[in-house]
Image: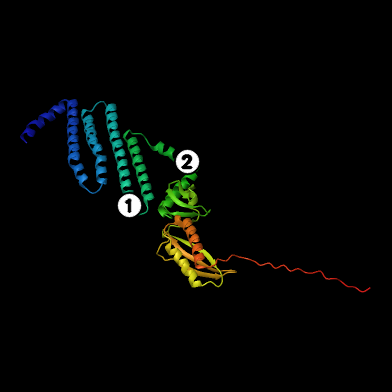
Amino acid sequence: MEFLQKWLPQIWAFMNESRVMGGLIIVGTFCILAWMVNLVVERVLLVLTRKSKFDLDDAIVKTIHRPVWLSIVLIGALIGVQWISPQPPFTFILTSLLKTFLVLIWALAINRMVLQIIEDWIKHWRESGRTGIEVIRLGGSITRIVVFAGAIFLFLSLWKINITPLLASAGIAGVAVALAARETLSNFFGGITVLLDRPYKVGDYIVLDSGERGEVVEIGLRSTRITTRDDVQISIPNSIITNTKVVNESAPEPRFRVRISVGVAYGTDVDQAEEVLLTVARKNPLVVSQPEPRVRFRTFGDSSLDFELLCWAHKPHDKGRLIHELNRDIYKAFEQAGIAIPFPQRDVYVYERSAGKVNSDG
C-alpha cells in the first residue's frame, strides 16, 4: 500500500506530462491483464471443464478463450489511443479500426458458439430419438444470419456511414428480388412450413399424390428429397409438397400393414386354411408380434372362398420383401396341407347339329 501511495501519483503525473508514454503504459498494463486472464483460463477454467461430463462447456471455453484476451488488448489499445489524442482524423480512424476488430472477433466467436451449441443439441436429440432436428438447424442458421447482420450494422455505425440510402435501395432491390425469385421464396416458406408442421421426418416412408413412394432422406429449405426402392432420388420443391396430399406410411406408428388376398377351393376346411395362414405369418421374422396377424374370410367368390391375411411389417421398406415371402410360403404350405388354390375356369360344350333332309311332295 505504501508503495502504491508513493508511486501512483508520480506515475500519473508522468503520464500526463508525456501523453505518448502514458498511452504505452496503458497498453502495456492491459497486455499484462490479458496475459493473466489467459493464464487463469488455461490453468483453471479449462481444467474444470475437462472434469465435467459435458463436452459443450469445453468447446465454449476454447472458443471464447482467444477472443477474451484479444478483446482486453484491443480495449487497452483503444484507451491508449484516446489518451494520446492524436490529430482528429487519426483518432477517429484508429478508434474505429480497433472497434471494428472487436466486432469482427466477437461475431466470429458467437458464430462458432452457435454452431457448437446446435451440433451438441442435435447430437442429444438424435441419441434420444426425438424429432425436430431440422427446426434446430433452421434456428441456428437464422441466428447466424442475425449475428452477421448485426455485425455489419455495427461496422457501418462505427465508420459513420449513413445507412438510410442503403435501406431505401435495399427495399427497392428486395421488391425486385421478390418478384424475380418468387418460386424460390415460395419453396423457402414451404420448407419452413414443413419443418414446423412436421408431416414427415427424415427416415419416414411417404407416398406422393403422383404415386411415387420412397424414404425421406433430406428436408431442405428449398426441396425435400426421397429415395425410392429402385434407388432413384426424387427432389420435390417444398412449394409443391405443401399443397399436395402426402401419405406418411411411417406415422403414427412406424410399422406397415400388409394385406395378402388368397382364395381356396370350395369344400376346403376353412378352419384349417385360417390356421395355415396364421402359422405362415407367425414364422416370418419380418412380421411383428404385436398386433398379432389375423385372417378374415371376406367373401364367397365365383370359384373360390376368398380369405385375407392381415399382418404388420416392422418397417415400411420391408413391404415388398414381406409380400414376396408370404406369397411363396403360403403356396408351399397350402400344397403340403392339400389345400387347393382354384383359378377361374370356364367349360365350353360344343354340340354337333346334324343336317336333316327336307322331303317335299311332287
Give the residue at x 32% y 46%.
119
User: How many numbered marks have been drawn onto this rendered protein structure?
Assistant: 2
Say above or below: 71 vs 275.
above
- Element carrying mark 2: helix
Say above or below: 362 vs 236.
below
Answer yes or no: is residue 98 visible.
yes
Q: Name the residue under label 1.
A: 127
Answer yes or no: is residue 247 visible.
no
- Callout 1 amino acid: Glu
Determine the residue located farthest toward the right in the rendered image: 362
Say above or below: 49 vs 335.
above
Dot 2 or dot 1, earlier in sequence = 1
- Between 257 and 168, the one lying in front of the other is 257
Distance (Cα) linking label 2 and label 1: 41 Å
Q: Where is residue 77 in the image (x, y as percent from the top left)?
A: 23, 31
Say above or below: 152 vs 217.
above
The picture quadrant where one finds residue 57 is top left
Give the residue at x 17% y 40%.
43
Left or right, 106 with reference to 42? right
Q: Are marks 2 and 1 in contact (CB under 8 Å)?
A: no
- Between 53 and 72, the one lying in front of the other is 53
Q: Which of marks 2 and 1 is in front?
A: 1
- Callout 2 amino acid: Val
- Element carrying mark 1: helix
Which mark is drawn over residue 79?
Answer: none
Q: Position of residue 311 (x, y in %)?
A: 45, 63
Q: In which quarter of the image is the C terminus?
A: bottom right
Q: Position of residue 166 (x, y in %)?
A: 41, 36
Q: In which quarter of the image is the N terminus?
A: top left
Q: Mark 2 points at which residue?
A: 177
Circle 2 crowding by C-alpha within 10 Å: few under 14, some 14–19, many from 20: few
- Between 93 and 228, the one lying in front of the other is 228
